[in-house]
Image: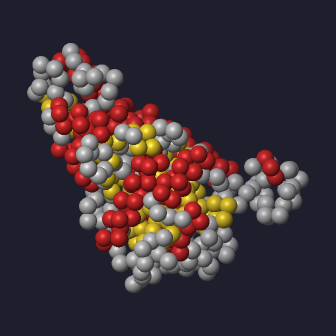
Amino acid sequence: MSTIGIDFGTTFSSASWVNPVTGFPEEIKFLNAVDKCKIPSIIYFQPQGKPLVGYAPYMQIENANTAADRDVIHRYAITSIKRKMQKNASFQGHSHVEIISLIIRHVVEEARKVCDFPSPPDTLVLTHPVVFAEWQKNMLREAACRAGFADEKISLLEEPISAALAYVNSNNLSNVEGVLVYDFGGGTFDVAYVKKDARGQWQIPIDPQGDPCCGGDDIDLSIYDKWEERVRQQFHRNLSPNPQEVDDVFLSRCRKQKEMLSLNANQRFTEILPPAKGRNFDQAIWEVRDSEYNDIISPIINRTIAKTKLVVDEIRSKHLPLDIVLLIGGSSRIPLVRQRLEQLLGDVSLIRTTGQVDTAVAVGASYYALNRPTLSPIPEPPIIKRVKFCIKCGNQFKDSDNFCMICGRKRDVL
Ligand SMILES: Nc1ncnc2c1ncn2[C@@H]1O[C@H](COP(=O)(O)OP(=O)(O)OP(=O)(O)O)[C@@H](O)[C@H]1O
Ligand SMILES: [Mg+2]
């Protein structure tokens, strides 16, 4: 039996395995991926030939220049399927389940090229956002089955809980009792809190929160809209020849600009606009200043802070410990995220990043499969258990309690 952990992401998918040499979970470094670990969640259904998945269609979008290239991409490539998922929908004749299964299958195939699994992976831990409806989880499960995993060998795990598992198991946290995970990715935002109990076991005393439509993709679109506004003013045309459609290639330029703005908030971008009828080489310039960029992205960042505040307020009202706020997910690199979190927490020193910003979710999936203590001095396997508190007096319920033993309030409130 071999296990693989997969973080099926909106923009990128990553994976982990338990290295048989060390016995510990590790992120998988692929041959063809962005920054080694991130396989783009993109498929290009070639009019002839097999679908291309991952890095190859990603590079195709990066390098597209002509109107013909753009048209082909628009018609045959699908990005961010995790955000577009619908029950009975299809793209180029392929159901959404099938599209997801192709991505899962590709990740497993690429993993097998670089990892010496003791046997072909037959057990899968697949992560998902906190706010994923049952039908979406069922779709993921079905996609995993189609990718070759038996239903009983598939486990689903919430993304920020997975990241928490990776963090608490791969760091020495002897003086840490409470960790909040802020996971801001390409399409979704999640926040979760885990707490160490008196026996050193990590628990989830508060329900995680999430926003399924709040991620880097939304920021890219806001930047795209800003360009659209400028282009209309300056050139009296739209970015895309069809104003109803977003030009995927220019959108990917907006993503790059956003990532550059995180490194330096004052930038001057010179872009060749998508070809439009009769005007092929319009060149537009945008000098972005810190304040303008922050104005564009504030509404999106604020949504993540509002969800985080719900969890932080609950931590505080229940007098639970909070020692670390861990930033996970590519979009957590945005400097405004840190600023807003500092304002919310009133304490900069709590905020931490890790070398696993992009892969903690995937690595946690293998810890979940392994279910064993590791580097941290935790006396028992860190099975994360959900505990419930009385909403009236804060007393912790035992599993068997139907009523609060302190104030008598019925348990079903939570
Ligand atoms: N330096 C950076 N500044 C701003 N955004 C960044 C930076 N680096 C990466 N990102 C953004 O992070 C996002 C991808 O993050 P990640 O890989 O964590 O998401 P995902 O797992 O694919 O999505 P999700 O978890 O939401 O389904 C992209 O929108 C990308 O542009
Ligand atoms: Mg993610």
Quadrant of residue 254 in the image? Answer: top left
Q: Is residue 193 above or below residue 72?
A: below
Does residue 194 appear in the picture of this structure?
A: yes
The residue positioned 43% from the left and 39% from the top of the image is 90
Quadrant of residue 337 in the image? Answer: top left
Q: Is residue 148 left or right of residue 41?
A: right
* Residue 358 spot, x, y in % from top left: 38, 58
The residue positioned 45% from the left and 59% from the top of the image is 147
* Residue 365 spot, x, y in % from top left: 50, 65
Q: Is residue 183 above or below residue 216?
A: below
* Residue 317 spot, x, y in % from top left: 68, 50
Q: Is residue 144 above or below residue 368?
A: above
Q: How many marks?
A: 0
Q: Nearer the viewer, residue 284 or 2?
A: 2
Q: Residue furthest right?
A: 408
What scheme was used to colour the molecule? secondary structure
Q: Nearer the viewer, residue 298 or 35?
A: 35
* Residue 220 spot, x, y in % from top left: 33, 37
